[in-house]
Structures are given as C-alpha cells and as structure tokens.
Amino acid sequence: MKPADDPDSGCLDYWSGGLGAEPTTIVRRDEKPGNGLVIGNTGLATTLPVRMGLSEAVSATLAKGRTAAIVVLKIGGLAQINHWNGYEIGDQVIAAVVRRIETCCQGCRLIGRLGGGHFLVVIDCQGQQDGLDREVKQLLTRVSASLELPNGAYFINGTAGASLMPDQGESADQLLRNAELALRSARVGCYAWYTPELQVSLASEVEIRSALVGALEREEFFLVYQPQVCTITEKVFGVEALLRWQSPTLGLVPPDRFIPVAESAGLMPELGDWVLRQGCCQASHWSRSGHPLRVAVNISAAQLEEAGFEARVREILSECELDPSLLEIEVTESMLVGLIEDNQNTLQSLRKLGVTLALDDFGTGYSNLAYLRNFVFDTLKIDRLFTSAITRENAGDVLVRAIIAMGAELGQEILAEGVETLEEKQVLQKLGCSRMQGYLFGRPVPASELEHG
Ligand code: C2E
Ligand code: CA
Ligand code: CA
C-alpha cells in the first residue's frame, strides 16, 4: 500500500530527485494528487529535508498512538557502481531501490535518502514488533535481489538497522541515531534492532570521552560493593568497591569501557581519588556502626604513578577517620611494569601505613614471579579465568593449586575471584582456598542493599 492509499496516513515521503547530485537535491512529494515533485535543490549538503520529514512522520505516528520502525538501510557497493559504471547507472540503481522499498512495505510511511547508499524508511504498523520485524525482513530480502538494468545485471546487497517507536526514542533524532547504531551492529546482509546495550558497546571512545567531561561534577558516578567471604566462617570479611557510571546520554557504561578512556584522557587521578574517598568514607561508616568491613579499592596506573599518591591516601584515611587496616588497595601486574622502583616505594610506604595490598587478576598478565619477589602483597587474587577452569578443564586446577601453594609459602592470602557455582566453591575449598568472591555469594550492589541484604 502506498501512503496515498491510506486515508489516515497524512504522511510525506521523500526521495532523491536529481539523483546524481545527492544529497543536496531532495525532492519531496506529498500524497495530494497533483502535488508533484519539487523542493528542489537546497544548496546544502545536508540531510535536513529528510530529517524534517522524519520529524513529521514521528509526530504523526505518535499522535495516532501507533508503533513504527525507523529503518536505516545501507546499500552496499553503490560507491563501486558509481565508480566503475558511472553516476547515471548509480542513479538508476538508487531509483530502483526506492521503487523496491515503495512496493514491498505495507506500512511504508516515509522513504528518504540520507546520502551515499543510506536510506531511511519509516514503517508503520498497527501490531507489535513481530509485524514490523516481518516487514523489515521482507524489505531487506526485496532490496537485496539482483537488479537488471538495460546494460546488465547488478548485485545489490542491503544491511539494515532499526529502532522502534515509541519504545526506543520519542524524538526523530534519537530514533534515527538508534537505528544507525543498530545498523553498525548488523552483519552485512542482515538487519538488527536497536537494543540499549548497543548504545554502550558501540559508543565510540570519542563519545565516551566527551560524555565524561563534567560527569564527576554532575554526580554521575557511584560505587557498588561485592562481598568477599571466608568459606570456613561463612562470613563476609570484606567488599570490593567497583565503580559505576550512569551517563544520561550513554546509559549505564561498564567500567571496562570507560576506565581506559578516562585513563587516556587523564581523568583517572581525579576519578580514582573520588573512588578512594567514597570507599573509605563508606568503610568508616560501616566501622562506626559496628560492622567493620575491609574495603578493597582498585587503583589505576595513573594514580599510582602520580607524585604524592601515598600522601593522598594518608590524607583521605584521616579525613574519613578510617583505620588503615580497613583499606585494601588492588593493583594489577601490568601496572607494575616500568617504574619498578618508584612503584615499589609507593606500595611499600602504603603498607607501612597499615593499608593492605592485593595483586589483582593474578595469572592473566605477565605472570612474572619476579613481581612477587619485588613487591610485597598481602592478597593474591586468582583471576576468574582460572576459577572457571577448575571445573571445566582437565587439569584446570593445576595452576590454582600452584598459586595456593605459593601463597601459603609467601604468607599471602589467596582470594579466588568470579566464583559462580557450588562446584567451583567446593573444588577451591578442597585445594585449600577459603577466601572467595563471585556471583555465588553476591553481585556488586550499592552499599544500602548490602546493609539490608
Ligand atoms: P576487577 O577488579 O577484576 O573486578 C571484578 C569484576 O568481575 C567486576 O566487574 C565484577 O562485577 C566481576 N565479577 C565479580 N564476580 C563475578 C562472577 O562471579 N562472574 C563474573 N562473570 N563476573 C564477576 P566490573 O565491576 O565490571 O569491573 C570490571 C573491571 O573494571 C574491574 O575488574 C577493574 O579492573 C575495573 N574497575 C572497576 N572499578 C574500578 C575503579 O574504581 N578503579 C579502577 N581503576 N578500576 C576499576
Ligand atoms: Ca579488582
Ligand atoms: Ca580481578
């Protein structure tokens, strides 16, 4: 059904007119008979008319309380066709694609060209996502068929990304961006729907970097705490503080994603300082309320390398009135590379304060046993990789066994990370490891949940 056939569509559709001159020439057609073709050349190399059309279509669809898919369709190979066969042929391909789109989608509300081989299609549907899913699939199949032109056959392949209105954005701009994100995640020749996770996984470093500016002042960060338990006493003896970022534009961004960016942007000393202070204040609060818990805080290389780090820790401990033995500082092997002597001095002076030190992700980095000779750690944290291997792989326990034996020899506490199953817990216990952390005992949660849980 073409828009004009739908009495209550009230829609507009756009497509490229002077096709070779894309995207400056946009022709608009509304469905009133006789209202032909012309907005003509805007003189601007922008997609503004298409986006305006999208805004109108979004408003109209929302006003009617309907569901619609905003689809960004990418036609592969158009640049090559233009290059090898000339722009005239390229134009014919585009025109054919537009015709295919027009004729295959039942609820097609708008067709626009965003430039290059990118098209915008709005598909309206009375039903739910299922119906739209079928339409998007059909669109892709239809568009991707080979194309016969007078001078030969062309293979067209389409890839699409779609966002759902109104669930996945109420503004035209948001919906378009979400559909583009989905497109970036789709395999060539396939289509993908937008999901909130995409926002995070595909947000480029640039986006993260710019969203990070001022995030601390806007109080977008918070800490969650994951219990560390002793399986002999069945008691929680400590918690690990883990940083979370709730960005208003990117959603909940996992630390693995934003910490490296914050590090490269030079934001980590300040952010790490905030984590340290927050964690220490929380530990002090627990201690004063009669439930002392050691808080383990992750430190980044930038913090460790900053002059005066030890003095900073001392200052924070005193500000928060926290007994240093209730703070553990976690470092990773990779942070110890390089400035061995400086780091050694910093770490040793921290220990002298009474703070304990943990070597995080043990076994995943260089696993250079020299670190254990050069640096004194109170805790070795066995990485999740090994914890999960003990029950899954043949002889997966060999390394864990060796680490535990070595820890005992060096007087270090061994803590196994990422314990998820009862079986893992039992094997670890059998091997002599009684300190554990993992989803089996508790996920990282805000302090208030830990108190009530
Ligand atoms: P990490 O220090 O190794 O932290 C442990 C990670 O494993 C956490 O991920 C935790 O949620 C996850 N985890 C815990 N138990 C389990 C389990 O049973 N199964 C599975 N699959 N995962 C488990 P998270 O919070 O996403 O942190 C990732 C990494 O980000 C941390 O790894 C740490 O390297 C870094 N990070 C987090 N907070 C901070 C911080 O405040 N400062 C610095 N410098 N790095 C931080
Ligand atoms: Ca850690
Ligand atoms: Ca770890």
Image (cartoon, grey):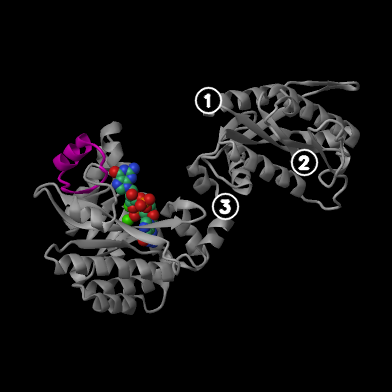
Location of residue 438 in the rendering, given as x and y in whole percent from the top left corner:
26, 46
Which residue bears the numbered disc 1? 130
Q: Is residue 421 magenta?
A: yes
- Residue 363, can we see it? no
Residue in the image at 30% along x and 62% along y: 297
Secondary structure under badge 2?
A: loop
Q: Do callouts 3 and 2 mark residues in contact (Cβ within 8 Å)?
A: no
Q: Amino acid at mark 3?
A: Ser
Q: Amino acid at mark 2?
A: Gly
Say which quarter of the image contains residue 399. top left
Secondary structure under badge 1?
A: helix
Label 3: few (<14), some or many (≥20) within 10 Å? few
Location of residue 445 in the rendering, given as x and y in whole percent from the top left corner:
28, 52
15 relative to 180 in the view: left or right: right
Q: Amino acid at mark 1?
A: Asp
Q: Is mark 2 within 8 Å of ligand 1?
A: no
Location of residue 219 in the rendering, given as x and y in whole percent from the top left corner:
41, 65
Which residue bears the numbered disc 3? 204
53 relative to 216 in the view: left or right: right
The magenta segment: 419-439
In this rendering, is residue 13 above or below 103? below
Residue in the image at 23% along x and 41% along y: 440
Which residue bears the numbered disc 2? 116
Per the model, the C-alpha gap separating discs 3 and 2 is 22 Å
Mark 3 or mark 2: whose residue is earlier in sequence: 2
409 relative to 339 in the view: left or right: left
Residue 302 has which mark? none
Location of residue 347 in the rendering, given as x and y in whole percent from the top left corner:
30, 70
Q: Is residue 326 magenta?
A: no
Per the model, the C-alpha gap separating discs 3 and 1 is 30 Å
